[in-house]
Image (spheres, helix red, strand yellow):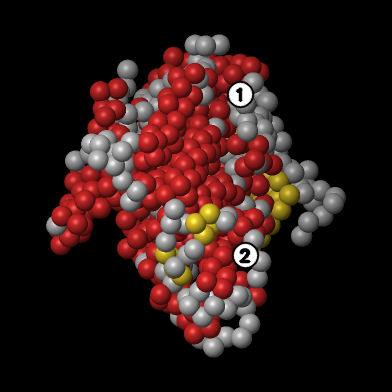
Amino acid sequence: MRTAKPLTEALLYLNGVTVSFDGFQALKELSLIVEEGELRTIIGPNGAGKTTMMDVVTGKARPDRGEVFFRGTADLSRLDEAAIANLGIGRKFQRPTVFDNLTVFENLELALAGSRGTWRTLFAQLSRAHRDRIGATLARIGLAERSRMPAGSLSHGQKQWLEIGMLLIHDRTLLLLDEPVAGMTDRETEETSALILDLAKDRTIVVVEHDMAFVRSLGARVTVLHEGAVLAEGSIDHVQNHPRVIEVYLGR
Amino acid sequence: MWGFAPSEDKGKWGKRFWASFAVCGIVLALAVPLLNTWVPPDSSIAMPDYIVPLLGKYLCFALLALSLDLIWGYAGILSLGHGAFFALGGYCMGMYLMRQIGTRGVYGNPLLSDFMVFLNWKELPWFWWEFDHFAYAAAMVVLVPGLLALVFGWLAFRARVTGVYLSIITQAMTYALMLAFFRNDMGFGGNNGMTDYKDILGWDIHQSSTRRGLYIASVLALGLGYLVCRYITVSKFGRLLLALRDAESRVRFLGYSVTNAQLFVFTISAVLAGIAGALYVPQVGIINPSEFSPGNSIEIAIWVSIGGRGTLIGAIAGAVLVNSAKTWLTSAAPETWLFVLGALFILTTLVFPHGIVGLLRRPRRIRARAAAPMPAGEQA
């Protein structure tokens, strides 16, 4: 399936992707295209396949059928998580996942760009440039004063930011954010929204979210998933007035 | 930059560390041999000859415990088959010592060991070739456990076998090896194992000077093993190990190969265990398949947890203290030992989960290294 010539100009290209677990089809012939530089939000009721879609893109789940390409050349259905991450795809989990027993600083240190090899990691030295970069990221996510605290002692919202910081520090091309404001206060949600819009200036971001107000605040193109396939796509106003979307969300 | 750059790496290898390391090393390496050599036997501080190899044995167990702490305390890999790597290193040394016996065996065969003559073998099996050279045997001490760990680890970690499943298959591995080594046809002396050694590198193995030498070699091996483990655990790779213990999938999504990291640390650990076994055999004078028994491997985990896992020094303390208690109790009240060991283990798990080191460090608050989740209520 590997071709030298890009199949598509799109950054992320999913075509006819089907994934099933124990007979249940989480994704049914899902096709989705995300262009470079785009900010895209994906919504859908529970079980619509949003998280499975992210699993497929990041190598955690393998599609039974279909194509998943990054930059039109890298076949993501054949690579493992680490290889996909090294292509420049970062992921934030639904539940904040940070390293509780490491300090905030050490969490960011592990996320720094650089060789991932065992040998290199064993002899790695933290350069001044690295420290500066960690310092800048800490400032950006508002955790500078907590840098020496174990990440396990942060509040829920702070963990979410730390996780975003870990994606940020490693100049990823594509960020997948799974419910970044889940469990956040209104103020934290606003700040996160501003942070995402700021980040979207120089990278491609796909946000999966439940919170409609938050999706509206991002003002991006919206894709609605339902039962493993795309139900509607367009602006937030377009999808909110779409008869099928209303039917699915309000029940039949 | 000091504001958000914890410059801990400097403290970890600072003057204070090297000073305490050197003091401990010199005291361990010199005190025992000196007390054994120069203090008259009737003095109250005399070190009788039989104590020297006994202490040497404890140091070998300490190195073995250290190797388990490296993978269990830091990377969260609980191997319950680490006795197998220890025993394999021991067997490699045992084969060298058997070849040194030469014509002094009961049957006086210059090439074949007594058990081979007894089995009516005519030729030396190929896997015994070259074991009369110490350098070759020493290389095998490292390579045999290392390669087994590499192959076993590759199969297990690539298939993402972790946690309790990994513990179970490591138990199965050591059990299978025990059964294999019990067979006479394997060519390693069957259930009698190998014993009745004469000399090592030309020195009589029963001489007290040789025993002092083996003791000092054990101190050196433990010291070097400690430095290797410490280097690994304070490096960025060490933080990666803690990270994958806490959130393995996050480590993968950061682009690190979890398989490679686990495989590397597992193999290093197996090599350290093998070296410990190789030093153990000449000091106790025998190696047999009971070293592979699953119970032995479980006991190593108990030493580490009593000492305090994820602390390195705790593993050493745990191994020495538990084994000293075992030596004393198994002669004073042998039938109670297993109950005491079991009680200690339960008590550690329930009352002081960070082990002895955790108890001593409690006033200073245990750093994030320990296994249990951080206490709540630290949010500023």
Residue placed farthest to the bottom in the image?
A: B120
Q: Which residue is mark 1?
A: A126
Q: Is residue A133 visible?
A: no
Question: Picture coordinates of residue B218 (x, y %)?
Answer: 46, 45
Instruction: Give the camera-side residue of A212 and B153.
Output: B153
Left/right placement of residue B224 relative to residue A86 reads left
- Please name the amino acid that badge 1 sits on: Leu
Instruction: Give the camera-side residue of B322 and A40.
Output: B322
Q: Which residue is mark 2?
A: B132
Picture quarter with the C terminus of chain B: top left
Chain for numbered disc 2? B
Q: From what the image shows, is residue B353 above or below residue B189?
A: above
Chain for numbered disc 1? A
Question: Picture coordinates of residue B30 (x, y %)?
Answer: 43, 34
Residue at screen point 58% across, 24% down: A197
Residue at screen point 23% across, 36% down: B44
Q: From what the image shows, is residue A20 above or below residue A112?
A: below
